[in-house]
Image (spheres, rainbow, N blue to C red):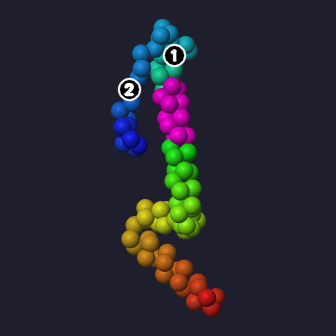
Amino acid sequence: MEGGMPRGSKAISDPPSSAPERDVGGVSSGRLRSLVERIERLQEERKALGADIKDIFDEAKSAGFDVKALRQVIRMRTWEPAKLEEHEALVDLYRRALGM
């Protein structure tokens, strides 16, 4: 994300609220409002990031890449090497068992 904080960062500060803070049934309305507004902002950012990712997949598709395979490669890059090796061995075994 350009110009923003790294993913997973918790440094989003609570903006000053124009409504007075009060307790309602033991719940701080100001703190609750702050949490809700922060979540809403992050959801909007996630929505924008989702649109950006879709655009990149569209670009990859128009460049001739197989998007389904690309998604699988991206997912597999997060796996531990041992898990990846085990997965590839199983896929190979299943292919051979099916005569592929």
Taking the magenta stretch, the answer to whether it contains residue 38 is yes
Taking the magenta stretch, the answer to whether it contains residue 24 is no
Nearest the viewer among 98 and 1 is 1
Label 1: state its secondary structure: helix
Q: Horizontal and vertical percent for residue 13?
A: 38, 26
Residue on which the image places disc 2 = 13
Q: Are marks 2 and 1 in contact (CB under 8 Å)?
A: no
The C terminus is located in which quarter? bottom right
Callout 1 amino acid: Ser
Does residue 85 sit above or below 60 in this rendering?
below
Q: Horizontal and vertical percent for residue 32?
A: 50, 22
What main secondary structure does the magenta stretch of the protein show? helix
Does residue 16 sit above or below 62 in this rendering?
above
Which residue sits at x=50%, y=37%?
45
Which image quadrant is residue 95 in?
Answer: bottom right
Nearest the viewer among 95 and 52 is 52
First along the sequence among labels 2 and 1: 2
Q: Nearer the viewer, mark 2 or mark 1?
A: 2
Label 2: state its secondary structure: loop
Per the rendered image, the range of residues in magenta is 36-48
Which residue sits at x=58%, y=84%?
94
Q: Residues within 10 Å of mark 2 (few under 14, many from 20)?
A: few
Nearest the viewer among 41 and 61 is 61
Residue on which the image places disc 1 = 29
Does residue 4 sit above or below 50 in this rendering?
above
Callout 2 amino acid: Ser
Does residue 30 sit above or below 99 in this rendering?
above
